Amino acid sequence: MASIARYDQEQANRAYNLPALMLRSESSSSSQIERLTSSARNVALAELSDKTSQNAQLIAANIAAMHEALAHERAIDAPLITRIHDTLVEGTDAAAGIRTEQVWIGGGFYSPHGAVFVPPHHSRISSYLDDLVAFSAKADISPLVKAAIFHAQFETVHPFTDGNGRTGRALLHAMLAWDDVLRCTTIPLSAGLLSNVDAYMAALDAYHDGHIEPIVEQLLDAVELAIALGAKMSAQFDALLNAWNESFIERKGAKIYELPALLVEQPVVNTAYVAKRLGISDRAARDLIAKACDYGILSKMGNARRGAFYQALELIEIIEEASSAKGLRRAKAR
């Protein structure tokens, strides 16, 4: 607890939205656990354009679901759980809301015969979620231990037809925020779990058999790795944004100085997005983007079908490395 509190305090009071960057890494890693992959560039593009791959759209929806989880300023409740899930699956074939049918993991398409795990009957889900919500409000248990047990029980209840894992990991962040474990920022927690997916899945299986310790250990290990990775990422972001700001020759107060903080939140932009966010005309936005390209901050991407978009490649590379196998190995070695 001391290390995560220290990390949270160290990352506070930045001039840019560090949590927005961390959530990109978090959403990418959470999706990778479910074998959904796409480049950070395409995911950022998917937030502005629907002319991207399905995986990019799904991971972009994961980012939106994470924001939904962290925007909730009250204790966890059943409507929040459903809202996170429905944000996650919006625009897909997955059913919104609590499931109304039996599901199973493994086995055949028509029958749970040979299934690895069969969650509870859908008629019991509402009462089980009420129990989970009550458990999440307990104050007589370590927040990290509580979060681990909550997560494992949520995955056991399996309240949705699809998206349970990603919803459950988003809820982990909501719990850590509500319990004041993380007051100022967030951590790439799923990157820690991604570093050893087999152990994570085995811990969930062990929980089904009544063993709590493995999932608690997995979450604590994931937090430790996420802190190391988050600290490394924040130092890289600081250095990059400082270098950008120091390279500008415009007078102080010029709009170019507002662009780096905007790119932190959205590392792929177009003229319309920059104009809207910075409150300037389309012409001024085009001129600003051209200046950023001259400085090497932005580079053009896209095609005639999608229109002109621009990427902050150096920012994107930091995000990409964080959830890559090489990036996770480096964080572990610290």
Image (tube, grey):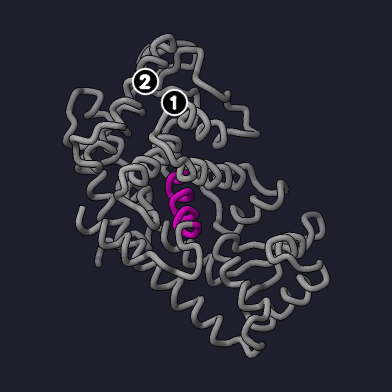
Q: At which x and y percent is residue 153? A: 30, 27
Label 2 near label 1: C-beta < 8 Å?
yes
Q: Which residue corresponds to mark 2?
A: 130
Q: Is residue 250 left or right of residue 317?
A: right
Q: Identify the disc placed on residue 78.
A: 1
Between residues 206 and 47, which one lies in front from this camera angle?
A: 47
The type of residue carrying mark 2 is: Asp
Q: Identify the residue at horizontal 77%, vertical 55% (top origin).
A: 306
> Residue flagged by tag 1: what amino acid is it?
Ala
Q: Quadrant of residue 10?
A: bottom left
Query: How many numbered tags mark residues here?
Result: 2
Regarding residue 144, the answer to whether it shows in the image is: yes
Q: Name the secondary structure under disc 1.
A: helix
The boundaries of the magenta stretch are 20-32
Horizontal and vertical percent for residue 278? 69, 66
Determine if the magenta segment contains residue 29.
yes
Q: Quadrant of the C terminus?
A: bottom left
Q: Is residue 100 magenta?
A: no
Q: Quadrant of residue 290?
A: bottom right
Q: Could you give the CA–CA distance between mark 1 and mark 2, rounded to whole angstroms?
A: 7 Å
Q: Is residue 59 above or below residue 302?
A: above
Q: Describe residue 267's horizontal placement relative to residue 113 as left or right.
A: right
Seen in the picture, residue 126 relative to 205 is either above or below; the reply is above
Asked if one can make out residue 329 in the rendered structure from this viewpoint, the answer is: no
Disc 2 element = helix
